[in-house]
Amino acid sequence: MSASFQDYLGLLRELSGTLGRLAELNQRKAAAVRQDDLIALDEELKQEQAMTLSLRGLEQRRLKLSAQLGLDGVPLSDLPRQCPPELEAAASQTVSDLRQSYQTYRSCANLAREILELNLYQIEKVVAAAGVDPAAAGAGYAPPGVEPPKNMKTDFRA
């Protein structure tokens, strides 16, 4: 059973690392918005989507391991008390690191969101000053006027 708890702690450390990378990504996203670099922002958003999928996979693994260990419904703060005595210190450190990673991530994500919202608000003001109603204008995207060549289309039903 100690090996299963070690696997669980390893998974939590992996989750902590992923949250750390997401925090860095949000910092880069905020920097891209500040520099008005839409290409960099788009790249960061794509990476964020991929990391979100990775988080889903980690959550599925966590649910499976927690069920095997009988930790369903056990709060993260109680995890060290549920571990074997020889892993209690490691579990306590892992929980602390995970909480810190989550706090850092939330802080960076909130900052990036606020910067994006501020810039969107400023864009709406510029559009409104130009005499266009931003609500009626829509997103501003139009489908391309040119069809791709037949050999570039994919039939997903095939």
Image: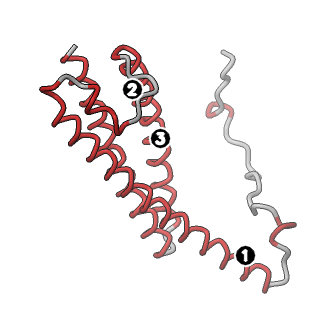
Image coordinates for residue 32, horizontal then vertical, percent: 45, 68
Q: Alpha carbon of mark 3 to alpha carbon of mark 2: how far?
A: 15 Å
Q: Is residue 103 above or below residue 134?
A: above
In front of the other: 12 or 21: 12
Amino acid at circle 3: Thr
Image coordinates for residue 129, horizontal then vertical, percent: 78, 86
Q: Quadrant of residue 26?
A: bottom left
Amino acid at circle 1: Glu
- Picture residue at 66% right of the left edge, 79% below the top: 122
Dot 1 lies on which element? helix
Q: Residue lying furthest bottom in this view?
A: 129
**Is residue 98 found left or right of 63 in the rendered image?**
left
Image coordinates for residue 111, horizontal then vertical, percent: 48, 67
**Is residue 152 found left or right of 147 in the rendered image?**
left
How dense is the environment of label 2, judged by Cα within 10 Å: few (below 14), some, or many (20 and up)?
some
Q: Nearer the viewer, mark 1 or mark 3?
A: 3
Disc sitting over residue 52 in the figure: 3
Quadrant of the rendering where the C terminus is positioned: top right
Can you identify the residue that label 1 sits on?
124
Dot 3 lies on which element? helix
Q: Alpha carbon of mark 1 to alpha carbon of mark 3: how far?
A: 29 Å
In front of the other: 99 or 78: 78
Can you identify the residue that label 2 sits on?
62
- Picture residue at 36% right of the left edge, 58% below the top: 104
Amino acid at circle 2: Arg
Quadrant of the rendering where the N terminus is positioned: top left
Q: Is residue 80 above or below residue 133?
A: above
Q: Residue lying furthest left in this view?
A: 86
Dot 2 lies on which element? helix
Q: Nearer the viewer, mark 2 or mark 1?
A: 2
Image coordinates for residue 71, horizontal then vertical, percent: 38, 22
